[in-house]
Image: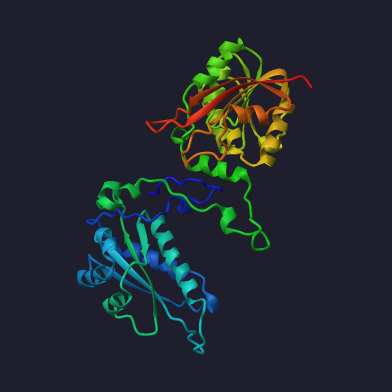
Amino acid sequence: MGRQRLNVQAPVARLFAERWSTRAFDAEKPVTAGQLAACLEAARWAPSCFGEEPWRFVVADRFSDEAAWRRVLDALAEKNRLWAQNAPVLILTACVPTFSQDGRTNRWCEYDAGQAAVSLCLQAAELGLASHQMGGFDVEAVREATGLPEGWHVMSVTALGHPAAPEAAPGPFRDLETAPRSRRPIEDIAHAGRWGEPWRPPAACGWEARYQETAAEQLPWFHEGLDADIGRALDELGLATGRLLDLGCGPGTQAVALAARGFAVTASDISETAVDSARARAEKAGVDVRFVVDDVLDSRLDGPFDIIVDRGVFHCFAEPEAQAAYLATIRRLLAEGGHLLLKCFHKHETSEMGPPGRYDAGDIRRLFADGFTLLAARDSRFVGPGNDAQPKALFCILQRSAD
């Protein structure tokens, strides 16, 4: 149901990964009473301060009470009415700001009502339904439309129904139905022990999430067969055999193609799911590749290798500390006189999508000055699946100097 998540940083349950707020509902398909009951039951069991359960819901179902549904719909902001008119159910969420036992102010009532509302939405997603919470409405009109008593806080209106194809969304919202989703990084929303100290997730978690949620063939860096830049470099250098490391092998297409050429290939990736997928690809192709789960910044691999192929790892590192750790690993693993075939995003690539590191030949020469000679640097492109734009790339051939 959900659109692809970008900048993922950890694997999550399918329910969280796929839930999103659609604006494309099937107007002809009702939500059954049983489905509504399940959603409300999930909300009923949400946690609350002192077990107060300060939330209340008013359910307006077009198929059972069109007049009630129409009153709530008419109270929505005009922009929301454009798409919410296709949702068969509109649910008001409200809460009472005082404790029932002694009348004291319950400053957690809105927090608790939010927990109940998201429980309702997650249960809807589990049932294959779609939901979209709204804050755009006339508060007093909603209060009047639902008969909500004075003293209760109007919190939100949630549209609920069966999802429809993206083109079912009204014109102004259609592109939103297929656009990828993104969020602030964890470092922006979580602090470690004290405000201002970012909590940083392990890098492996993000890559694992990406490979778990997206089919390999749909990943933007997927390339069936050997990358033309890599093949051309091997031919120019006259390299046809030797120990080769495919660094950050991902789906394993490069490792398979290189093994088919006759190299003794070791392929590593930080994601266990990626390695499992690559291993299956190699087995299907009938080639022998040694696959290893490994982090280039803290590598446990043993060298030396005659060739290291890096198609899209180095540009993931923009911080000097990470770059230094990467370089230390490459220096340790690459044999003297060995070659590093490096493909990364070019500094001239201005798209906001993609890795943080963008380089030109001068950057590579400077960063790899200790222990490497830059033999060639060429402007290129990253060719991915489909007809998507091909990001500008820099392909470099470096040789390991003698210590």
Q: How many marks overall?
A: 0
Quadrant of residue 35 within the rendered picture: bottom left
The reply to whether residue 317 is visible in this rendering is: yes
**Which residue corresponds to the image point at 56% horizontal and 11% vertical from the top-left?**
235
Q: Residue at x 54, y 24 (%)?
A: 254
Q: Is residue 210 left or right of residue 387?
A: right
| 236 left or right of 193 in image | left
Q: Hey, which residue is sitting farthest left in the picture?
A: 67
Q: Nearer the viewer, residue 296 or 17?
A: 296
Relative image position of residue 6 (x, y in whole percent): 48, 45
Quarter of the image where one finds residue 146: bottom left
Which is more toward the observer, 93 or 40? 93
Horizontal placement of 333 versus 2: left or right?
Answer: right
Q: State which quadrant residue 397 falls in.
A: top right
Front-lying residue, 311 or 379: 379
Q: Residue furthest bottom?
A: 102
Camera sees residue 240: no
- For this rendering, which residue is in front, 364 or 87? 364
Image coordinates of residue 159 in percent, x first then y, are 32, 63
Q: Residue at x 43, y 81 (%)?
A: 96
Quadrant where the C terminus lies? top right
In this picture the colour scheme is rainbow
Residue depicted at 52% across the width and 51% down the height: 12
- Residue 52, relative to residue 195: is it above or below? below
Q: Vertical placement of 201 versus 329: above or below?
A: below
